[in-house]
Amino acid sequence: MKVKIKIPTDWSDVNIETFQKFEELQALELPSNQKNLEIVSLLCSVEKNVLERFKITEINEIASEINELNVDNVVDVEIKTMIKLNKVKYGLIPNLSEMTTGEFIDLESFIQDGVVKNLHTIMSILYRPIIGSINANGQYTIEDYIPSEAKEQNMLKLPMDIALGVVSFFFRLGLTLQSDLNSSSEKQSLVMARA
């Protein structure tokens, strides 16, 4: 019996739900061959009982290819301000400096509780359905922030390249802000020392 396996080649082939399960698997202390079987089953969407008929070298080779996703430089993933998921157009919060208190508190809380386990919820805060039309300048309005489990569950199907684009943007923004704060603090300390 021949089995066709689609091996994910980049993060667009993996959705948030699968990524979260993948991360859980990575954290488990399993013998390497068993872990590889689990990972290949999950990321290639093939039942374990089917994969158990493969040679161990084949499973390990596929797992090795999958693990290449881990070593890719995800910092260079492009941020997408508008996406389509389940036939709905979503927009990233257009102006982060105008985030509501509720958006900010929830976002901060879910990030502190664990980005990976809450990634779908974080994305449901940042990406919301576009209401109305998109103007000639690419500007749009998104629906108001009203948290719901249904919206969070919908984001489980969001491809990881989109999620990683947003996460890397916030990571770079955080590093820039930290650097600016450190530089400002150093200048302030220097001014205070001279006074």
Image: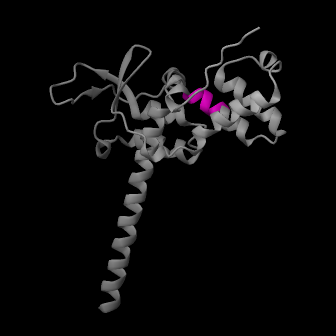
- Which residue is at 33% across, 72% downward? 184
The residue sitting at 82% across, 29% down in the picture is 56
Left or right side of 125 for 49: right
Magenta segment: does it hold 117? no
139 in relation to 183, above or below: above
Question: Going by the picture, which residue comes out furthest to the bottom?
Answer: 194
Q: Is residue 19 part of the magenta span, yes or no?
A: yes
Image coordinates of residue 34 in percent, x first then y, are: 82, 32
Residue farthest top in this picture: 1
Residue 114 occupies which quadrant of the picture? top right
- Residue 26 shown left or right of residue 132 in the figure: right
Q: Dividing the image into 4 quarters, which one contains the N terminus?
A: top right
Position of residue 70 measured from the top left corner of the image (x, y, whole percent): 60, 42
SS majority, magenta = helix
Colouring: one colour
Give residue 28's quadrant in the image.
Answer: top right
Give the tally of numbered discs: 0
Q: Using the image, determine if residue 157 lies above or below residue 162.
A: above
Question: Quick one: 28 or 189, which is closer to the camera?
Answer: 28
Q: Residue at x 67, y 31 (%)?
A: 21
Left or right position of 4 against 60: left
Q: Quadrant of the C terminus?
A: bottom left
Where does the magenta region start and end?
A: 15-21
Q: Position of residue 126 (x, y in %)?
A: 40, 35
Residue 190: give x, y in percent of width and height.
34, 84
Identified at 17% across, 25% down, the residue is: 135
Task: Give above or below for 163 relative to 109.
Answer: above
